[in-house]
């Protein structure tokens, strides 16, 4: 659909109507029998009876100020503007309450209608959280599932990168306009997503910067594009839980990876499971629930071959958590000197049983 088409201009005018968000816009459309053309055919008196004030009625009749910008923007390579009546507008997203009136897209828009799982999590993940994200995403890609996330720092970024590294498709939904990409640290990642057949998506005008109120709106699109949402590490007040709530309201499945009670980044996931989310240990728990074909791949990474550690080092392993554990804590638990513990931890690391991270060591899966 060309940006000069009357239909696109009408959607632009509706989206830019002052004081009317997506919820209010769809209420107006419902009064107009769901047809954007019908909305513009009604007299001012009818629009006033529907609650539009004079300024809103004038704005609705005026050519949208974003019309020229949209026209120029769509002339750029791989730039697309989808409206709800566009044939490439993703069907699953069209089903949700207050679906976006505009989808500004950069990349391969056909990816919007592929089989997707939304994967979200903490902006400050632990080593285990990042490792779980990589393993699950790589297994999902092997099962021909596209990965949808929010391009945020932390788990979102890890998931996008893991999908790309595995040769898969990933979709990034932004809380800013596509020409004001946030966070700036992920500019190169965004370019890689587009280059490898994925797509960047936003309902915000291209020049809009990130605002706090944009991100809950962004989250409903992340969950709305997919049949299910997987949460990997989330604190109790995490934005990832907003995405999970949107998924439930949209009638989609919610999955969560459990975590240690001592890990504050796992409390949100544990709560979700307590409230009925599907506990995930492997992607079989996801593809089986959603009825997707594809051979599940084990989350457990194979350990590199190495000389087996001695008995003392093996006994020390029980004192290292799957979260970051300092050398002091390991020594105190084992009742050994720090010097002795350091040597044994090095031996365990060479055997692939622990990994050195900032602040200490973490125990590896397997």
Image: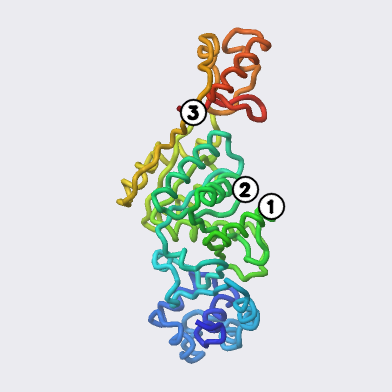
Point out the frontmost of discs 3 and 1: 3
The answer to whether the residues at label 3 and label 1 have Cβ atoms under 8 Å apart is no
**In front: 278, or 296?**
296
In the image, taking residue 34 as reference, residue 108 lies left or right, namely right
Quadrant hosting residue 330: top right
CB-based contact (under 8 Å), mark 1 and mark 2: yes
Residue identifier under label 2: 153
Please, is residue 102 above or below residue 43 in the view? above
Q: Report the residue at 40% width, 64% height from top.
A: 92
Residue 201 versus residue 84 in the image, above or below: above
| x and y, in percent, of residue 175 in the image | 60, 60
Q: Earlier in the sequence, mark 3 or mark 2?
A: 2
Mark 1 residue crowding within 10 angstroms, few (<14) / some (14–19) / many (20+): few
Q: Position of residue 328 (x, y in %)?
A: 65, 16
Q: Residue at the spot x=64%, y=24% of the render?
A: 360
Q: Is residue 4 above or below residue 81?
A: below
Work out how far the residue at label 3 is from the one at label 1, CA to CA, in angstroms.
32 Å
Residue 337, given in percent of the width and then of the height, sits at 66, 8
Dot 1: what SS? helix
> Which residue is under mark 3?
303
Q: CA distance from mark 3 to mark 2?
A: 28 Å
> Looking at the figure, which quarter contains the C terminus?
top left
Mark 3 or 2: the one toward you: 3
Mark number displayed over residue 326: none
Per the rendering, the mark at residue 185 is: 1
Query: Which of the 4 quarters of the picture holds residue 180?
Result: bottom right
Question: Which is nearer the N-term, disc 3 or disc 1?
Answer: 1
For the residue pair 224 and 142, the one nearer the viewer reads as: 142
Q: Position of residue 93 (x, y in %)?
A: 43, 65
Please report whichever mark, 1 or 2, sits nearer to the chain's N-terminal start: 2
Question: In the image shown, does 115 or 66 lie closer to the viewer?
Answer: 115
């Amino acid at each position: 659909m060309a940006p000069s088409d009357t239909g696109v201009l009408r959607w632009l005018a509706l989206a830019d109507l002052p004081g009317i968000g997506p919820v209010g816009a769809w209420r107006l459309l419902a009064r107009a029998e769901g047809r954007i053309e019908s909305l513009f055919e009604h007299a001012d008196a009818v629009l006033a009876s529907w609650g539009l004030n004079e300024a809103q009625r004038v704005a609705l009749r005026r050519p949208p100020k974003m019309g020229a910008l949209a026209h120029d923007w769509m002339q750029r390579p791989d730039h697309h503007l989808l409206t709800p009546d566009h044939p490439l507008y993703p069907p699953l997203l069209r089903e949700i309450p207050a679906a976006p009136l505009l989808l500004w897209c950069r990349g391969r828009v056909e990816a919007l209608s592929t089989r997707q799982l939304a994967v979200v999590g903490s902006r400050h993940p632990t080593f285990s959280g990042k490792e779980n994200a990589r393993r699950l995403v790589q297994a999902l890609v092997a099962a021909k599932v596209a990965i949808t996330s929010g391009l945020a720092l932390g788990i979102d970024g890890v998931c996008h990168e893991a999908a790309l590294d595995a040769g898969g498709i990933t979709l990034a939904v932004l809380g800013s306009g596509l020409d004001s990409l946030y966070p700036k640290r992920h500019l190169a990642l965004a370019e890689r997503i587009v280059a490898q057949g994925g797509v960047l998506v936003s309902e915000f005008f291209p020049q809009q910067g990130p605002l706090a109120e944009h991100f809950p709106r962004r989250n409903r699109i992340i969950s709305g594009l997919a049949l299910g949402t997987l949460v990997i590490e989330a604190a109790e007040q995490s934005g990832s839980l907003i995405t999970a709530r949107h998924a439930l309201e949209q009638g989609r499945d919610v999955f969560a990876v459990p975590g240690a009670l001592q890990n504050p980044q796992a409390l949100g996931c544990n709560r979700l499971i307590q409230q009925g989310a599907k506990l995930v240990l492997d992607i079989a728990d996801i593809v089986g629930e959603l009825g997707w074909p594809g051979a599940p791949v084990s989350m457990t990474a194979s350990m590199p071959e190495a000389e087996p550690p001695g008995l003392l080092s093996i006994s020390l392993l029980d004192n290292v958590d799957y979260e970051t554990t300092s050398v002091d804590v390991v020594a105190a638990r084992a009742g050994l000197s720090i010097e002795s513990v350091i040597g044994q931890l090095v031996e365990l690391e060479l055997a692939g049983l622990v990994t050195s991270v900032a602040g200490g060591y973490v125990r590896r899966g397997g």
